[in-house]
Amino acid sequence: MPVLFHPLLGENAVKTAQTYLDEANAIVPKLSSEEAIEIHAAGGGIFVDVRDSSDIQKTGTIEGALRIPRGFIEFAADPGMGFHNHALQKNADIYLVCGLGGQAALSGKTLIDMGYKSVTNVGGIGAWKEAGGPMEAT
């Protein structure tokens, strides 16, 4: 049986959810809601809500945000797939939001791994809303 080796955890290591989050947070920059709201107000970048549609339906989302669930992000981001969302371009500034920031970080790492150059985690929708960020209902 092959020995598993993980560069952060050592031999015989199995990744945990926290390991995945730590790796994502190490490479995906994070902005405060206030900074992200300024960028949004200036018309900068593409905002993407990576929560499931049922969560978005409960709270609404960022005004004008794309709605691409984390479980579908690879398909939407890959130009070679029939499900590619043409708004997702590898040189675009992409800002991700979710419930608290974890799914946005994980989605951001995936996009970076796929060759996207400018991906940022703006955290959770609650903080966005609390900071006065523009919202839209579903």
Image (cartoon, rainbow, N blue to C red):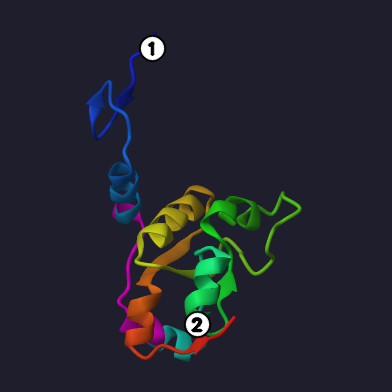
The residue drawn where x is 43% and y is 52% is 109
Residue position marked by numbered label 2 in the rendering: 44
Instruction: Say which quadrant the N terminus sits in.
Output: top left
Instruction: Say which quadrant the C terminus sits in.
Output: bottom right
Circle 1 SS class: loop
Question: Can residue 129 be found in the magenta stretch?
Answer: no
Question: Observer-nearest residue: 35 or 55?
Answer: 55
The residue drawn where x is 52% and y is 56% is 70
Looking at the picture, which amino acid does disc 2 mark? Answer: Gly
The residue drawn where x is 42% and y is 62% is 104
Q: Is residue 18 above or below residue 69?
A: above
In 3D space, how far apart are the residues under numbered discs 2 and 1 (Cα atoms)? 48 Å
What range is drawn magenta here? Answer: 26-37
Residue 2's disc number: 1
Give residue 23's position: percent from left, percent from top. 32, 47
The residue drawn where x is 35% and y is 64% is 101
Looking at the picture, which amino acid does disc 1 mark? Answer: Pro
Q: Earlier in the sequence, mark 2 or mark 1?
A: 1
Q: Nearer the viewer, mark 2 or mark 1?
A: 1
Circle 2 SS class: loop
Q: Is residue 49 above or below residue 24?
A: below
Give residue 66's position: percent from left, percent from top. 59, 72
Q: Is residue 95 above or below residue 128?
A: above
